[in-house]
Amino acid sequence: MSGRWPETLWLVRHGQSAGNVARDAASAAGDYRIAVEGRDVDVPLSALGEEQADALGHWFAGEEFEDDRPDVLLVSPYVRARQTADRFAGAGGGADGLIQCVDERLREKEFGILDGLTTAGIHAELPDQAEFRRILGKFYHRPPGGESWCDVIFRLRAVMDTIALHYAGRRVMIVAHQVVVLCLRYVIEHLSEDEILAIDRAGDVANCSVTRYRFDPVAGPQGGLVLDLYNQTAPVRAETAVTSEPDRSEAKSA
């Protein structure tokens, strides 16, 4: 018995979004601002992102996962995450009777006044914030109107409590964002600031990649979740292209 833990917990980053594409283009051109209109919450998947979400669903629909598909989907309210979850489920990736819930605590990290700016744009237009971030590091720096990684971690601890309360013993998949995947690793694995930032610096979380934890009854006094896959791109690579652009204003520097 898994007690308070799910049997399996998958963490999935949404498919490539129109915002990822625009950010990549802006950075390559040396632009200060990303050419995305409207709210970040409303940015949809790109055509490639739709293919990636379908590919992920097809992989889980295969015989390998016949008795191991998620039966609970917890999803960020952002359009790109909801579209990823919908396409995953539509491609047969979920178990029969799949429960699908939107949870606002899984939303993207809020960038505040940095939203829509490239790294070059932050240095040019908001040099004080660039300096604050250099001094504090991305883990603790909170831009005006935005969040630090610690703020994201605070809400994700509450998500894990909800999973323990309502979905113990279930097979749970979270569909969210790059920073959410990384911050959940920090929470589940009891990592330090240095450890999680080193993982972040090593490379972006790929779009529609799979990170998986399995319950292990001997991992601690009451058992626990043990990582057995991180940033696995095989399901996407089998059908379409793998992408791993950073989200909006999230630069790689610590």
Image: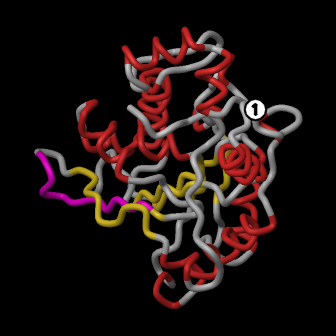
Q: Between residues 54 and 246, which one lies in front from this camera angle? A: 246
**Rendered location of residue 166, percent (x, y):** 49, 43
Q: Quadrant of residue 57?
A: bottom right
Q: Between residues 235 and 227, which one lies in front from this camera angle? A: 235
- Does residue 62 appear to the left or right of 197 in the view shown? right
- Secondary structure beneath dot 1 equals loop
Residue at the far right in the pictured view:
37
Q: Is residue 1 visible?
A: no
Residue at the far bottom in the pictured view:
63
- Does residue 194 appear to the left or right of 81 in the view shown? left
Vertical comparison of 31 with 154: above or below: below
50 in magenta:
no
Question: Which residue is located at x 76 percent, y 38 percent?
Answer: 34
Identify residue type, mark 1. Answer: Arg
Vertical comparison of 254 with 163: above or below: above
Quadrant where the C terminus is found in the figure: top left
- Residue at the spot of label 1: 33
Q: Which residues are magenta?
A: 211-220
Q: Quadrant of residue 120?
A: top right
Question: Which residue is located at x 66 percent, y 44 percent?
Answer: 27
